[in-house]
Amino acid sequence: MDQEDRIALFLDYENLALGAREHLGGMAFDLRPIADALAERGRVVVRRAYADWSYFDEDRRMLTRSHVELIEMPQRMGASRKNAADIKMAVDAVELAFERAYVSTFVICTGDSDFTPLVHKLRELNKRVIGVGVEKSTSALLPPACDEFLYYDRLEGVDVPPARAKRSRPARLPSPEPQPVEQEPEPQPTVEEPVRDVDTLSVLVAQTVAGLQGSSGGEVTASTLKRTLLRKDPTFSESDYGFRTFGELLRHLAAQRVIELAEGPAKGDPEVSLPEHGDQEVAFALVRSVVQDLAGADGAVALSGLKNQLRRVRPDFSEKKLGYRGFLQFCKAAATSGAVRLEWNADADDYLLTTPTT
């Protein structure tokens, strides 16, 4: 148990409940999906929810069954209930960070950007911060501040009801003929967010692995890669791309030759690397072939426009899938391997590529 993260859960309940009702088809907020997601990340030792509970009588029972401590923030005449709840929750979180050193992770459930300074302060105190909020009611400022951000509507177990088309009332016409009864439109199925582009993910993973290999000079494990992806995009989740686990995602990318997997230092945490051969050698051979075909009288081809020529031969070509941040970096690697020569030409104001003579 000493290896587990200790988690403190703080809920800005009014923000969550109203966000769910307004943006998720009127559904009631349910804590269970959040509790299940946190159970996969560690042991929740503190659960507190802040609201004026006279507005959420039914919700109190649900939270009490989940052993959540209800912090009452009664509405006072001439005072802002929202600001009072925000301040109380922020003070309690910082106080807990100082008093309970064993609490390693704070989960701030809100979409309110007013909590961004709290997130920064907790991270400054060496605490991991996970945010949770309803996507459409979450400020764009909050997710990037967190170590990880979970959108409530995307959590397993949250079934957003289908959006119903509004029923229009037929106008009365001064006609003796009976009016046809307007049929209520059938409920439209929920418009699900389209699965994100796996090719875009391939580029992100390849570039991240290349960057980790370059900065650390050592092995890159799957857990290190996942943490780095979350630092780049705290809302990252493999489920958005149609994968159940991060390991399943890595195996798919390995099958596509984007990465290679090998046994890592710990079971279930494989080493991730970029292919040393295969697609990279094919890409170098491709650029050499295209340069040979396009070479003019002087035997040189300008760098500008060359990428488009490569794609005419191989439409799926992308240097980013090979871990290169730009086409120039890829061409420099091809030159280092001996596939082509690359030199700056001041007259052409461009790099020129030639094929080495044997």
Image: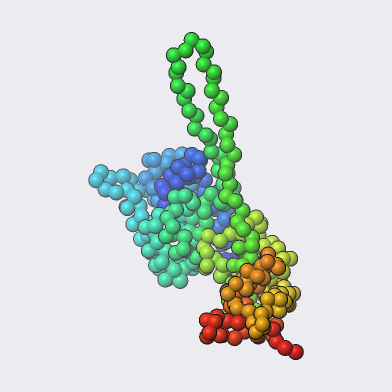
Position above or below: 166 against 22:
above
Position above or below: 120 against 166:
below
Image coordinates for residue 113, horizontal then vertical, percent: 39, 57
Residue 157 in sight from this viewpoint: yes
Residue farthest to the top, as pictured: 176
Image coordinates for residue 260, horizontal then vertical, percent: 71, 72
Q: Residue at x 28, y 45 (%)?
A: 76
Q: Residue at x 67, y 62 (%)?
A: 249
Q: Residue at x 54, y 18 (%)?
A: 180
Question: Is 52 on the left-hand or right-hand side of 157?
Answer: left
Position above or below: 320 against 44:
below
The residue nearer to you, when weighing 246 against 332, is: 332
The residue nearer to you, when weighing 129 against 113, is: 113
Image coordinates for residue 262, horizontal then vertical, percent: 72, 74
Quadrant occupied by the C terminus? bottom right
Image coordinates for residue 317, horizontal then vertical, percent: 67, 68
Q: Residue at x 49, y 51 (%)?
A: 135
Quadrant occupied by the N terminus? bottom right
Position above or below: 318 against 243:
below
